Image: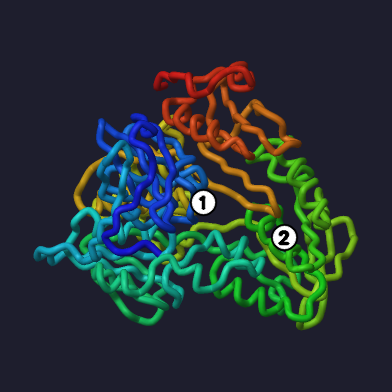
Amino acid sequence: MATKNKWHKTVADDQLKEGKPLGARAGTRAVFLTRSGGRICAMGGKCSHYGGPLEKGRLQGQVITCPWHTARFDVRSGQVQAPPALDDLAQYETKVEAGDVYVRKVPAEKLSRPHGKDDRTVLILGAGAGGLNAALALRRNGFAGKVMMATAEGDLPYDRPSLSKGFMAGDTARAELVLEPESVYLQLGIEILGEHRATGLDRQKKTVSFSNRHKVRYDKLLLATGGRPRVPAIKGARRRGVFVLRSLRDADAIIAALSGAETVAVIGGSFLGLEGAASLRSRGLEVHVVAPETVLMARVFGPQIGAFLKRKHEEKGVVFHLGKTAVEVSGGKKASGLVLSDGSRIAAQVVVAGIGVVPAIGYLGKSGLVVNGAVPVDAGFRTPDPDIFAVGDIALVPDPLTGEARRVEHWVEAERQGRHAALGLAGVEEAFREIPFFWTNQHDVSIKYAGYASSFDRVVLRGDLEEEKVLAGYYREGALRAVASLGRTKEFMTALEILKAGGGIPPSRFEDPRADLARVHSPKR
């Protein structure tokens, strides 16, 4: 292990080029180096989210983007610029001797609540992706008032995407799900109100009521209550052995029910349904998936990638019943299987429904903030009430490129919205300009997706899908609106910049393997 304050020789000075990322070692630690504005910068080499190698990321100006899940960091300070990373990177002092670059770790500053007197209270409803990032960003932005996070759950904020992936598969330990230890909340003065389910909002009195009869007054309020899972509207859906998957408590219940089970039936071909199917299959269970569509994920990924995903699942032994729906959960007090719309039956001891979520907005009742089942907000996440903001699954947000109202049910989108909403909560007006991003892992397939295409009229493939090295472009009226990637990370990250610039690359150039996407300079639309 590296000795405290010890200098480590890393790379030759002439290896460091302006604006080029380079990886090295400082003792046993990975470090990332670059030259920015003539200055040598060094910081921890692994993303603080899942440990992605930053030397393989995309460096633009003074910001490095992680190649795995697009977290961003400032190379001068190591500070997080965009989730899913929550924590800053270790910083290293640098010096050059005899043509070599040496680095020495700088002691990390202890996190603490900002100094100053502030009597205001920011109340955050929800401790998921949006709520947590808003709370942390408030402190980062210097807000010294009271910050309270109320959650219906009893656990510290945790990594929800892992529930259907590593945790369900048995590869991720429960302790690994915790996003920040309790000590961080204590140091930052963030109060977590566990087992607090919101039941009502009084905008005139500026109070929120909870199921435990507790009432909390606020000066500023952030609605980040996420979604609640849909329960199949079919006979027998309330039988023992039928589950939805949204919370850690749900995941624990499903895993407990697997003891002695041989077969699991999954209702729904959603991301959660397919990730759960892959994880359950990895446990050696027989897994059946029932979904009404004839091609998996075609609405999101298009028919080619959808058909590819089905083949990958089938190679692992997952059995599909597509073009059909579940009409009944059979059994007595406990589920014994499913009856399908064509009259066929599946015997299963456990049934998991993954048919999406609906915004958790029941507590908003007569607040006047809900329109057509969601909460419309402006580009700074402010509702018509200037003291109330909303992010995540419940928020209807104007897309920065098209102006189209979008509601995206993905973890990273909610994280970035929460972080940005903290600016408004602290009194800073700034429009949100992030491109939605998500990833899915199913068996040994990992797909990254960026952009917003509520619909598309053309799918263009760049590369070879069967070799799992392909970039897909989703076009609408000639403009690139979204991209998906299997194994073409560098081009994917370039495509992110094209999307941010307006998507002005013609389909013919996108699919041309000889065309260098990095040379595209897209005008804003």
Q: Tag 1, which secondary structure?
A: loop
- Image quadrant holding the N terminus, namely bottom left
Quadrant in which residue 513 is drawn: top right
Whether residue 382 is visible, yes or no, is no
Q: Nearer the viewer, residue 304 or 226?
A: 304
Crowd class of label 2 (few under 14; some 14 to 19; many from 20; radius 10 Å): many
Q: Nearer the viewer, residue 307 or 518?
A: 518
Whether pointer 2 and pointer 1 mark residues with C-beta atoms closer than 8 Å, the reply is no
Pinpoint residue 197: horizontal percent, then vertical percent. Answer: 42, 73
The answer to whether 58 appears left or right of 383 in the picture is right
Asked if 330 appears above or below 340 in the picture, the reply is below
Residue depicted at x 29% and y 34%: 36
- Image quadrant holding the C terminus, namely top left
Residue depicted at x 56% and y 37%: 489
Whether residue 340 is visible, yes or no, is yes
Q: Which mark is residue 410?
A: 1
Which three-letter amino acid code belongs to the residue tagged 1?
His
Crowd class of label 1 (few under 14; some 14 to 19; many from 20; radius 10 Å): some
Pinpoint residue 223: horizontal percent, then vertical percent. Answer: 36, 59
Q: Where does label 2 land, which residue?
A: 277
Which three-letter amino acid code belongs to the residue tagged 2?
Ala
The answer to whether 189 appears left or right of 195 in the picture is left
Q: Nearer the viewer, residue 214 or 55?
A: 55
Q: Rounded to the nearest whole Å, what is the CA distance between mark 2 and mark 1?
A: 19 Å
Q: Is label 2 or label 1 in front?
A: 2
Quadrant in which residue 262 is drawn: bottom right
Residue depicted at x 58% and y 67%: 172
Q: Nearer the viewer, residue 160 or 421?
A: 160
Q: Tag 2, which secondary structure?
A: helix
Which residue is situated farthest in the left direction here?
117
